[in-house]
Amino acid sequence: MKTLSTFTAAAALAMTAGIASAEVKIGIAAEPYPPFAEKAADGSWKGWEIEIVNALCTAMEEDCEIVPIAWDGIIPALLSEKIDVITASMSITEERMKTIDFSDKYYNTPAVLVGPKSMEMTGDPASLDGRYVGVQVSTTHANYVDAHFADTAEVKTYNTFDEHNQDLVAGRIDAVVGDSLAFQDFLNSDAGQDYEVKAELNDVAIFGPGVGGGIRKGDTELREKMNAAIQQIREDGTYDAISDKYFNFDIYGG
C-alpha cells in the first residue's frame, strides 16, 4: 500500500507540474491587420494587440504561444482546443456569446464606411443605392452591412481586410466597411491617398460593447485571470505606455 500510495502521489505531482507549465495558446488572425497585428520580416508577430497580449501574459504569469489561425476558422479552433483564447480584434456580441465566452473588453473603436474622396456617399443606405460595398466575411462589419446596406447596395465579401482594400483601389468596388483604426495605415499610404472615411457606423446590437478575448465556455479560471490582467495593465500604466506608441487618442474607449 505504501509503495502504491507513493507512486500515486508522485504521478499526481508530475501531472500537476505538467499542467502548470503548459503554455496558453493565444489565437490571432493569420491575416495581417495593422496596426493590431502583422508579421515582421523575421517571421515574428508585431503590433499593438501583440504587445498587449504579451503584457497580459506577463500579468497572468503565464507562458504563452502565439498561434496564427485563418479568421473564418478561429472560433472552431478555440472550440476544438487548438487554442485557448482569441485575441484578434473580436467584438463582444450576443451572437458570439451563444457559442463562446469573452473577457472584459480591452479596446473599443468605431466601424466606418470608407470610399473615394471624389464620390458622394454617407452612412445612409440610400446613398449607397447601386454601389458595390466590400467587407470582410464573418465579422461584425459584415453583419452590419447585411442588416443596413444589403437592400440598396451590392455586397461583396472577402476573406481578408487587405483583399477588399485592394479591390477598392482597383475600382472593382465603391466602398468598404471595417474598423476605423484598421483603416489608418491604408488611408495614410500612397494607395489610400484618394480615399477617406465617409461615415462612422453605429449599432450597439451588432457591434457590442467592444473587443475582448474569446474564451471557451466553462473556462472560468482563464477568463477571471485575463480580466484581472486587463485591470492590472490598465492601472499600472502598461496599457497606456503601449498604446501611446501607436495612437494619439484613448483606444480603450468609454
Image (spheres, rainbow, N blue to C red):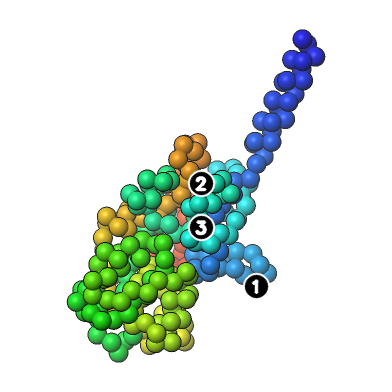
Where in the figure is residue 64, as x and y percent of width and height? 61, 49
Give the farthest residue toward the top. 1
Callout 3, which amino acid? Gly
Where in the figure is residue 36, as x and y percent of width and height? 49, 65
Q: From mark 1 to mark 2, how far is it between C-alphas?
A: 31 Å
Sequence-earlier tag: 1 or 2: 1
Q: Residues within 10 Å of mark 2 (few under 14, many from 20)?
A: some
Label annotation for residue 61: none
User: In the image, is residue 185 above or below residue 232?
Assistant: below
The answer to whether residue 48 of the structure is visible from this angle is no
Q: Residue at x 42, y 52 (%)?
A: 212
Sequence-earlier tag: 3 or 2: 3
Q: Residue at x 48, y 43 (%)?
A: 216
Q: Secondary structure at mark 2?
A: helix
The residue identified by callout 3 is: 73
Q: Is residue 81 left or right of residue 234?
A: right
Q: Is residue 44 left or right of residue 161?
A: right
Callout 2, which amino acid? Leu
Q: From mark 3 to mark 2, how far is it between C-alphas?
A: 10 Å
Q: Residues within 10 Å of mark 1 (few under 14, many from 20)?
A: few
Mark nearest the camera among 3 and 1 is: 3
Query: Image quarter for residue 161?
Result: bottom left
Callout 1, which amino acid? Ala
Q: Secondary structure at mark 1?
A: loop
The foreground one among 110 and 71 is: 71
Label annotation for residue 79: 2
Q: Residue at x 46, y 86 (%)?
A: 191
The residue identified by callout 1 is: 41
Q: Residue at x 46, y 64 (%)?
A: 244
Task: Say how many tags the image has.
Answer: 3
Q: Secondary structure at mark 3?
A: helix
